[in-house]
Amino acid sequence: MKPDYVKPLDRRHGRVELSQGAGGRAMMQLIGEVFARALGNEYLNQGDDGARLPAPGGRIVIATDAHVVSPLFFPGGDIGCLAVHGTLNDVAVMGATPLYLAASFILEEGFPLADLIRIVDSMATAAREAGVPVVTGDTKVVEAGKADGVFITTTGVGSLREDVDLSGAHARPGDGVLLSGPIGDHGMAIMSLREGLAFDAPIVSDTAALHGLVKTLLDAVPTIRCLRDPTRGGLASTLNEISRQSGVGMVIEEAAIPVRPAVAAACELLGLDPLNVACEGRLVVICPPEQEAAALAALSAHPLGREAALVGRVQADPACFVQMRTRFGGRRHVDWLSGEQLPRIC
Amino acid sequence: MKPDYVKPLDRRHGRVELSQGAGGRAMMQLIGEVFARALGNEYLNQGDDGARLPAPGGRIVIATDAHVVSPLFFPGGDIGCLAVHGTLNDVAVMGATPLYLAASFILEEGFPLADLIRIVDSMATAAREAGVPVVTGDTKVVEAGKADGVFITTTGVGSLREDVDLSGAHARPGDGVLLSGPIGDHGMAIMSLREGLAFDAPIVSDTAALHGLVKTLLDAVPTIRCLRDPTRGGLASTLNEISRQSGVGMVIEEAAIPVRPAVAAACELLGLDPLNVACEGRLVVICPPEQEAAALAALSAHPLGREAALVGRVQADPACFVQMRTRFGGRRHVDWLSGEQLPRIC
């Protein structure tokens, strides 16, 4: 479908216009030249109000995530690839193989087209690398001042493996708590940029699609109890969520939790606790004790899990407390994130 | 999952806070007391990063839509029910039975909680009436001034009927163009409110879930070529889209197109063409000529199709023009909407 355009898009100096969200000719042009051009595939190209897709087979998983990260571009990524990774990871940690993505854009009038194209291209690259097509989408434009550049909601649909049964409610006393790599990289990449912190080498977001790592892990250890990606609220909130859902407590070891020196330094400077800082490419794994070694080996063998570590253990605790044994041998309560210290991190 | 709240939500006078999007305790509270309370069902209540769902069986359809309508509340509905109807309709016009909805909210800091609750409750009512649960969701909060109250993206997943094959590319010369009811009600309900037009009786949005009407129609006439809901860009853009996709032209009859007198009057006042004004509860049906009578009868027998009419006919035209025979016997070209005359209508 190729309407006769009034004028060609200025891909370099143009800006998003309200008419590009109004359902007519200008919208068809934006969709064709920016979105379909980068993201096109047999499903998206159907050009109907939704996408017709082959049967996924078995139970399905649906996850949705709005992405409002600020700034839109950051070391290691941008809102485009983040919107792909974030939702794929939500599907993957359910034990599902992501099959399809839907993408909905809210654009602010006046947003530079060149930036939009960069974001959509990054999204296309991330989707291609992940092997998951964007099959349908939507674009709305709001007046200047009524949004903040670009917001992207992605929804993922996946096919659930029959041999696994993962849930935040499945943690049992004695289970190991594993982490696939250092925490806080994504959050501190964003915060350092916002706060203008300068380091010799910038902190780089860990944003990545985890479904390959999850597959490697579940192929090796299908009896995993629970998987999560510790995004907003960080490791602290993720562990508290699982503890609540399962009605158990946990003890984690500060010395065992990998944190990069630059992330630790930036947290120190900004008065943040790395336990509260978002990751976008890390996995929390709750695993029966007899499978810990196998799970750790599987994680470590994958490029995204090289720094995997056993960081704690589930224990019986009707109060569902998460505690941390500190480097100095003390114990402290690890609470949910309670303030608004890290808005718009993803 | 019920974290110990710091303070109870003030459902009457409270406002959305940044902390309610930060992944911690305050977010769990908002999700529990506002979203899960209204929308809760066995899937949403799983409380994991996504929803695990039974196999849909057969091919699936996915559709996604961002909703940025302004104002948020209007005669006949609000952004909450609109976000349910809009996406269900996109799934339905593909010939699919909607099964599941995902909902993602972008909230502006300071937005009144009472309004949010009203919106979520309206969403819950619309989902319940449609028989389609909201199975998973997401909430983000951005700083005051960085959004406009509430934006909602919904994504629908449906199961595709095996006996139908609908596409905008299937229209053939000779086919009838049917409309399920009057056009422009939704768009003019919004525009009248924005422009402060006063009528004896306000124009009421036609927002409605169409999957029941679609089922009735397809049960009676499975050989329908194409269904669309003429939202943004109105009937004019919808017919132009289908014409382009199918490589055909169309002639519609002005006298046959139902437009309510108040809608016509408001359009006149604001210099708008009803053909460009969005509907949110109307169906465009392209149908083989020998099935027109049966299709019209099926539509008319349903409460949402009582005012259905045959409004035009597909014809061979390599230029893919949509033309209208006017009340006075002339002909005019019906073009795509080309300006930004109707931003944020849905």
Image (tube, coloured by chain):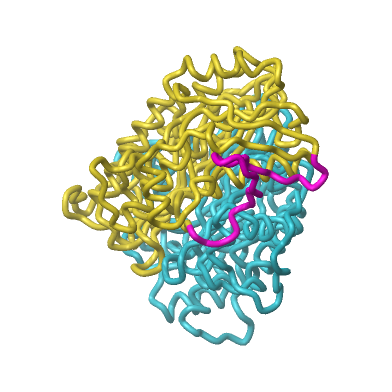
Chain colours: A yellow, B cyan
Q: Answer left or right for A15 relative to B177.
A: left
Say how many tags the image has: 0
- Give above or below for B261 relative to B29: below
Please report the residue visible at 38 percent of the width from the left and 55 percent of the height from the top: A269
| Residue at the image position 60 percent from the left and 73 percent from the top | B15
Q: A330 or A79, which lies in front?
A: A330
Query: Can residue A289 be seen?
Result: yes
Query: Compared to A144, does A300 lie above or below?
Result: above
Q: Position of residue A278 (x, y in %)?
A: 49, 45
Q: Does residue B172 appear in this view? A: no
Q: Could you say which is closer to the camera, residue B105 or residue B89?
A: B105
Q: Is residue A168 left or right of residue B257?
A: right
> In the image, is residue A326 part of the stretch drawn in magenta?
yes
Q: What is the x, y in percent for residue A259?
A: 45, 37
Q: Quadrant of residue B150?
A: bottom right
Q: In percent of the image, x 42 and y 71: which residue is there?
A: B145
Q: Which residues are magenta?
A: A317-341
Q: Quadrant of residue B242?
A: top left
What is the magenta segment's predominant secondary structure?
loop
Q: Is residue B216 magenta?
A: no
Residue at the extreme right = A318
Instruction: Name the one closer to the observer, A101 or A70.
Output: A70
Estimate the x, y position of residue A101 in percent, counting from the top left.
50, 35
The residue depicted at 67 percent of the width and 62 percent of the height is B120
| Residue B241: % across, % down | 41, 45
